[in-house]
Image (tube, grey):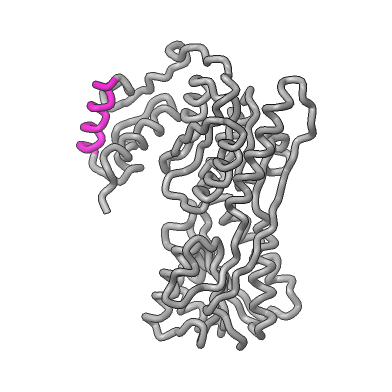
Amino acid sequence: MREPVEVRRQRILAAVESRGSARVSDLAAELEVSVVTVRRDVEELAQEGRLRRGHGVVRSTLAARDIPAPRPPDGDTVAVVVPERHTYLYESLHGARSVLEASGKRIALHIAPQVAGAERPLAERALKDGAAGLLLAPRWRTLADEEADHAWLAALEVPAVLMERRPAAGSALHAMDSVCSDHVHGVHLAVEHLVCLGHRRIVFATRDDSPTARTLRSACARIAGAHPLVETWAWVLSAPEAGQEGPYAPEQTAGLHEVLRRTGATAAVLHGDVDALMLVQRLADHGVRVPEDCSVVAYDDVVAGLGTTPLTAVAPPKADVGRAAAELLLERLDSGAGGHAPVRRVELLPSLSVRGSTRPL
C-alpha cells in the first residue's frame, strides 16, 4: 500500500533534523521512492519553512543558532515518544495515559517515523514547548542506532523514563530509569509449556530488528541450549525484512516449514503476532497443520488470539509497563530538583495464554 504523502514528508523531516543535512539521493534510497518524489516533497517542506534546500542537499532549519531557548517546564505536560506502526507499544502508551491523565498531566504525543535518529528532534521539540518530563520508546532497529542516541539521552535535563528498553550495563544510559518486560522469563514460559506437552525439538522464529527481538533471540539460544529435555533447536528469522544489516546463514533465512522438516521439530515459538499468523498460514500452504503437526506459541499476544486457529501466546504486560513508567516519572517530577532517589530498573513478568495452537505430542 502506498505511503501517505504527509507521512513520507514527516519521515524526510525527521531524517534531516536528526542529521542536520542529507542528500536528496540518500533520502530517496532510504524511503524507497524516486528522487523526483523526494525533490517535490522537499520543495513543499521548504516553502513551509520547515527545511532549507541546496543543490542536491537538504538542510534542517533547526541549526543551533536558530533554536530559541526552551520554555521553562510548565509542570503539566509530559511528552511521550513512540515509534509509528507499533501496536505493541501503543498498548503501553494507553497504560501510561491512564496514569498521567488521572494525575492531571497533559500528554503531548510524538510519533517517530521509521528513520534512524527520529526520536531526538521530537524530544527536543517537546522540551522547547515546555514538557516537564519524557516517556520514550526508541525504535533502535540496530545496536548502532541505540548507541547513537546515548549521548543526547544521557544529557537530558528533565526526568525521563525508557519504556520496553533496557539500558546496557556500563553504557551512558546505565543510570537512566527504565521499565520493561522480562522477556527472558517470557521465553522460559514458552519453552516450559512446550516441553511439558512432550515436545523435544523446537524451532524459534524471531525478529532481529529491535532491542526486544535481540533479547528474545539471545534468550531462546540460552534457554533451549541449557534445557535438559530439549534435544534439538534451531533459529530462523520470522520475516525476511525482520533482520538487521549483515548476511545470515542459509538455515536462518530458510522457510519455517523447511527447518521443521530438516530438524524434525514438532513445535515452534514465533515472534511477533502478525509474523506468527502469517507463518502459520504458510505452514498450512506446505501441508503442515497447527497444532496436529506442529504446536505454535506466539510472542506478543496483541492479535494472536484472532487467527483461524487462536494461537497460544506469551503476553508481556504491555499496558502495565506504560502505567509503571508513568508512575515512576511522576515520582521523579514530584521529587523536584532536590530528589536523590536511586535509579530504578523495573522488570515486569509476562504471562502465558494457552489457546488452540498447542497440544501434547
Dividing the picture into quarters, in which one does residue 228 lie?
Answer: bottom right
Count of numbered tags: 0
Question: Looking at the picture, how far across and down is residue 53, in whole percent?
Answer: 28, 22
Q: Is residue 351 above or below residue 133?
A: below
**Position of residue 275 measured from the top left corner of the image (x, y, whole percent):** 45, 65
Q: What span is in magenta?
A: 35-48
Residue 162 magenta: no
Q: Residue 46 colored magenta?
A: yes
Q: Residue shown at 62%/75% (left/top)?
A: 233
- Dominant SS of magenta comes to helix
| Residue visible at 42% across and 24% down in the picture | 20
Establish if 226 lies above or below 172. below
Indicate left or right for 289 with 269 as reference.
left
* Residue 342 or residue 324, whichever sits in front: 324
Residue drawn 59% across the image and 62% down it: 315
Quarter of the N terminus within the rendering: bottom left
Measuring 51% from the left and 62% from the top, which residue is drawn there? 272
Which residue is more in the foreground, 236 or 134?
Answer: 134
Q: Is residue 256 left or right of residue 312?
A: left
* Res. 176 visible in picture: yes
Picture layout, residue 355 above or below residue 299:
below
Q: Looking at the image, can residue 118 be seen? A: no
- Residue 235: x and y, percent? 56, 69
Comparing 157 with 96, the one in front is 96
